[in-house]
Image (cartoon, helix red, strand yellow):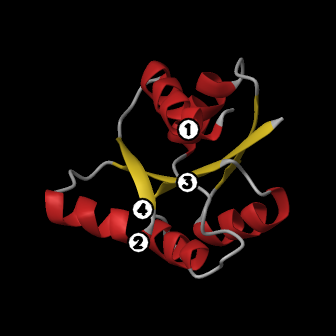
Amino acid sequence: MTTILFCEDDVVIQRLIHVATRSLPYTVYVVGDGAEGLAAIERERPAAVFTDLAMPGFNGLQLIDALQGRPDLADIPIVVMTASGLPPAELEDLHQRGAVDYLAKPFGPNELRAKLDQVLAPLGT
């Protein structure tokens, strides 16, 4: 089964992720920060990672950089979830770092499922 990992520290968004994905044919893990995320990625080898940028401690940018620094993990698609508007220069920086897309918060279940479909379609899952 396809595994998706979400790194998100906001419990309201965590609940939304659980509700939006519970009927989907994926195994979904939700962790609270980038350090937990990296450990889960090493253990589970997810098909995709969705990460918040602003998390305490090990944040989303640090997670992206850690994944890109690991040849065995660098090909995992990363989607950034952020409440802050991203100007074009910041979007380009995220793409250069390895993020394939972003999802603006707040988002609803339908938006999340559509983004999952979009990211996973090229992978054939």
96 w.r.t. 114: above or below: below
Mark 1 or mark 4: name the one nearer the start of the chain.
Answer: 4
Amino acid residing under circle 2: Arg
- Please state which amino acid type lies under the numbered disc 1: Pro
Which of the pair 39/70 is nearer the observer? 70
Q: Identify the image quadrant of the N terminus.
A: top right
Quarter of image, res 122: top right
What residue did someone put label 4 on?
Answer: 53
Is 4 left or right of 64, judged from the image as shown?
Answer: right
Secondary structure type for disc 1:
helix
Cβ atoms at labels 1 and 4 below 8 Å apart: no
- Which labelled disc corresponds to residue 66? none
Amino acid type at image mark 3: Pro
**Mark 4 is on which residue type?**
Leu
Mark 1 = which residue? 122
Looking at the image, which is closer to me, 90 or 69? 69
Mark 3 / mark 2, whichever is N-terminal: 3
